[in-house]
Amino acid sequence: MDLRTYRQELDEWIVHHHEDLTPTPEAFTGLEGQFAHLSKVKRLAYEAGFGRWGWPERVGGLGGAPLLRALLGERLTAGGYVQPGGWSMTEVLAPTMIDFASPELAAEVVPLLLRGDEHWCQGFSEPGSGSNLAALSCRAVRADDGWVVTGQKVWTSFAHLSDRCVLLTRTGPKESLHRGITALFVDMDTPGITVRPLRTMHGVDEFCEVFFDDVHVPADRLLGVEDGGWSIAMDLLPYERSTALWHRGAYVRRRFEDLLHDAHPDHLDPHAVGEVALQLFALRSVSRRTQHRISDGERLGAETSVDKLLLSSTEQAVYDLASEALAEAVTTGSDPASERWRSEFLYSRAATIYGGTTEIQRNVLARRVLGLAEEH
Ligand SMILES: Cc1cc2nc3c(=O)[nH]c(=O)nc-3n(C[C@H](O)[C@H](O)[C@H](O)COP(=O)(O)OP(=O)(O)OC[C@H]3O[C@@H](n4cnc5c(N)ncnc54)[C@H](O)[C@@H]3O)c2cc1C
């Protein structure tokens, strides 16, 4: 399927299914309703074929370039049919499963994620090891038929709504740092797992603390090789800054257009509007190049930190502009539109933290792309 035909057929399909794809008011407010709606949209897209193009046939896809997926997510997020956060988990986690799970496991579980039958989460960060991920300490000990996991994760987005988790565990001594990490694919209903949602300042229980107390994980849930989990993390993080980021960028651009529509022209500083428009354009240009690189089969690496830096600064710039132009709505408005602007303004503060902080992205670029010296 070529991009032009896909775009044309997709746009027609969206127009035709607009009503089915549009979230109900419940799906706008609560995360549970949002996820139920996400499942519905994914199922509709999968059954119509659009949700399968761009994914390999061995995991339920129809083949074709990943650019097709970039377009699907763009249309659905910018169209307001799905929230970019929930949608992005597929783009972040499915490629890793395709690359590192056994072919049998990938063939069994990836279609469940693509079709919206399941949601998955990413268990990397821990109290004390976020930026310093290689110091993680959630331990997995070899048992006869797999592993026994004990420890804690934190900031695990959507863990309370997830069926499975891509989990990083420590299997070597702590001093071995990134060389002693193993990635496992864990069912969230396994006995011994406790999930506690954390309330965020934007009013949504988006992420959780997850406790593992002697949790048994079967041997066939190993991703990659034992003690090789670091390469999985390094493979996954660029995905967090690629197609998922393209979708979030599309959503932010749409909200910028909404802002121009919602705000009184006298409250919009033309100079500030122009600056933000330029930032959005730069983000889209750089991210577009990344989408083409993925479709050309290139392996992504540290340079995707540029995309993440551009997204963080642009997202915050859009909502800073909103907080000035819609000051009353963002601070005290109680109608649904004002509450949405307020919630999104507050959430935009996290843009310089999730997926690796701005400081860490700059360090990555300095060391790994520009070849500058280590810190002392
Ligand atoms: C909305 C949101 C969703 C998230 N979802 C997930 C998820 O699903 N799964 C998951 O595993 N994690 C998730 N996270 C966690 C996220 O990856 C971490 O918050 C992030 O990596 C930072 O780690 P930390 O919070 O431990 O902060 P720290 O690492 O303690 O950093 C604190 C501050 O110190 C700075 N800093 C640290 N080290 C350096 C250094 N070497 N040089 C310069 N500055 C430094 C940081 O930039 C930051 O400003 C999420 C976070 C947010 C905000």
Image (cartoon, grey):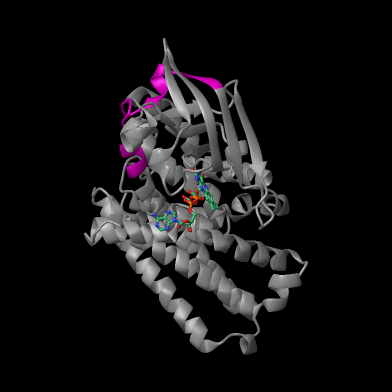
In the image, farthest residue toward the front: 376
Q: Which residue is drawn at 70% across and 67% down?
A: 337
Q: Residue at x 40, y 73 (%)?
A: 281
Magenta stretch encompasses residue 144: no
Q: Give the farthest residue toward the left.
A: 371
- Which x, y percent locates residue 57? 33, 34
Quadrant location of residue 246?
bottom left
Q: In this view, does 264 lie above or below 100?
A: below
Percent coordinates x, y for residue 50 in the rendering: 44, 46
> Looking at the picture, does residue 111 appear above or below residue 313?
above
Question: As rendered, which of 22 and 133 lies closer to the eye?
Answer: 133
Quadrant of the rendered structure where residue 290 is? bottom left
Q: Which residue is drawn at 48% across and 31% down?
A: 138
Horizontally, residue 293 falls left or right of residue 121, namely left
Drawn side of residue 339 relative to residue 96, left or right: right
Residue 74 point in image, percent of width and height: 46, 58
Q: Which of 49 and 269 is in front in this view?
A: 269
Q: Where's the C terminus, which quadrant?
A: bottom left
